[in-house]
Image: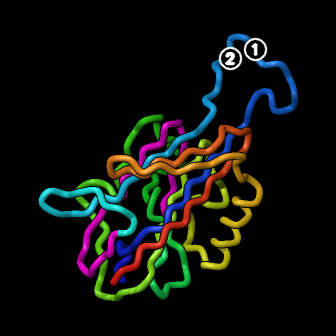
Amino acid sequence: MRAETIAITALVAFGLSGCDRLGWPVSSTSKPKSPELQLDYSILLDGAPPRRISEKYQFQSGDRFRLEVRPAFAGWVYLFSRGAGQKEYLCLYPNQDAQRGKALISGQTVTLPGGDNWYTLDDSPGSEAMVLVASAMPIADLGPSVPLAQDDFEERIAKLERERRPRTAKRVEEAGWTKLFVSHDDAAAMVMRISIDHK
């Protein structure tokens, strides 16, 4: 499988800190926080014209696709992949020095891999994985670095799920977009795992 070859597993994580976390009174001039955090994403399949597809789509060798990500909050996005039969996760985004440490603007849509590029499935079928992480704060354990061994990566994700599970979470499908919502707690994380097979 080429380095650009992936299918989809989506992971969305949010971390927040509130000024009234320790019981201190909130100033009357403070902006009320939203009861929920939202992240939208879609899978765009190449074609004439390109079209958004369901996560249940059966990928074939040679299929090309992009991932569109649209957070409704200012924060960071990370994208990791592990191909069929591979033992490591690679960080696909941010993958340039200019992208690292840079927060996205609320409502900004980011198309990955970016520019005129597409992710392309090779001739090796199997279950491949993409992991998307979006956060209101940088997540040091998941920052771009050297490839992470599968067991190490999964341990970090499990820790994130244990320590930052939201009180509520929901998922909505709308007009080709998957919309993810979690309760706006001081510290919250929502983890989505979606398998798409490459036939």
Q: Does the magenta stretch include residue 130?
A: no
Q: Which mark is residue 27?
A: 1
| Above or below 195: residue 164 | above
Q: Give the range drawn in magenta.
A: 57-80
Residue 145 x/y as whole percent: 57, 65
Residue 16 x/y as whole percent: 68, 40
| Above or below 95: residue 22 | above
Callout 2–callout 1 Cβ contact below 8 Å: yes
Q: Does the rendering let one see residue 98? A: no
Q: Residue furthest left?
A: 48
Colouring scheme, one of rainbow, by chain, secondary structure, one colour = rainbow
- Considering depth in this image, is 117 or 30 the residue closer to the camera? 30
Q: Tell me the quarter of the picture where residue 20 sits.
A: top right
Residue underneath mark 2: 30
Q: Does the magenta stretch include residue 73?
A: yes
Side (left or right) of 103 relative to 41: right
Residue beneath the point at 76% across and 27% down: 19
Q: Is mark 2 on a helix, strand or loop?
A: loop
Side (left or right) of 144 relative to 152: left
Q: Which mark is residue 158?
A: none
Residue beneath the point at 52% across and 48% down: 180
In the picture, which quadrant includes the N terminus?
Answer: bottom left
The crowding category of the residue bearing disc 1, from other C-alpha atoms within 10 Å (few below 14, some 14 to 19, many at least 20), is few
Q: Distance between the residues labelled 2 and 1?
A: 5 Å
Side (left or right) of 75 relative to 54: right
In the picture, which quadrant includes the C terminus?
Answer: bottom left
